[in-house]
Image: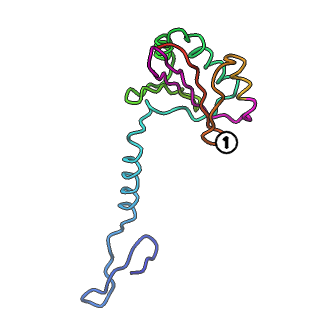
Amino acid sequence: MRVTGAIAHGPLGADGGRQPEKDTTMTIATRGLAVLALALAPLGASSQAGPSPAPAAVAADLFSQVCVSNRGDYDGAVDLLGQMSMNHDAESDIHYHPQYDLSFKVIAVGNGAAYCSMVWSSTNAVPANVAAIATVAPDADDPVLFTPTLMRTRLLGKE
């Protein structure tokens, strides 16, 4: 088969001329979009963080509001996250910030204790992120790096 312009020419017909084949360009594109849509379907907007990295100061401020201020009772952190403009994924119980690539989760660890965990990406250097979190929660876990720009910090408190 050879392609000229947008028409694909198929095998020879009874009269010796080439028979045009169905143009499958749109079909292939439509199939590709359908596959892409299916692949992204579980990641609905309600369970995605925003597109922008969070500056260290913003991450520290949110960590202070959510985790530090509610350390004595993390049910308060969950309530606060429900009042903020976070996108909540009920299945994973993760709250995603709509603007920043940042999320929160409260994780019970037993005996009435729980972690308030924040995962975020930042364009700041790691030492700047560590210092910003230390200003609001000196005893928080040092950030665990998942990639050079994606990290997690958490604070132990009560459920």
Q: Nearer the viewer, residue 31 or 42?
A: 42
**Residue at x 58% of width, y 35% of height:** 51
Relative to residue 40, is residue 14 depicted above or below?
A: below
Q: Is residue 149 magenta?
A: no
Residue 87 x %, y %: 47, 25
Crowding at dot 1, Cα within 10 Å, few <14 / some 14-19 / many 20+, comes out as: few
Give the main secondary structure, helix, strand or loop, of the magenta stretch.
Answer: strand
- x and y percentages locating residue 141 in the rendered image: 63, 25
Q: Which quadrant does the N terminus fall into?
A: bottom left
Q: Secondary structure at mark 1?
A: loop
Name above or below for residue 18 compared with residue 115: below
The magenta span reads 104-128
Seen from this angle, which residue lies furthest front? 111
Q: Please state the horizontal and vertical placement of residue 59, each as a whole percent of the image.
A: 64, 24
Of residues 43 and 104, the one nearer the viewer is 104
For the residue pair 114 and 46, the one nearer the viewer reads as 114
How does the figure colour the protein chain or chains?
rainbow
**To which residue does mark 1 refer?**
148
Q: Residue at x 64, y 29 (%)?
A: 54
Name which quarter of the figure residue 68 lies in. Answer: top right
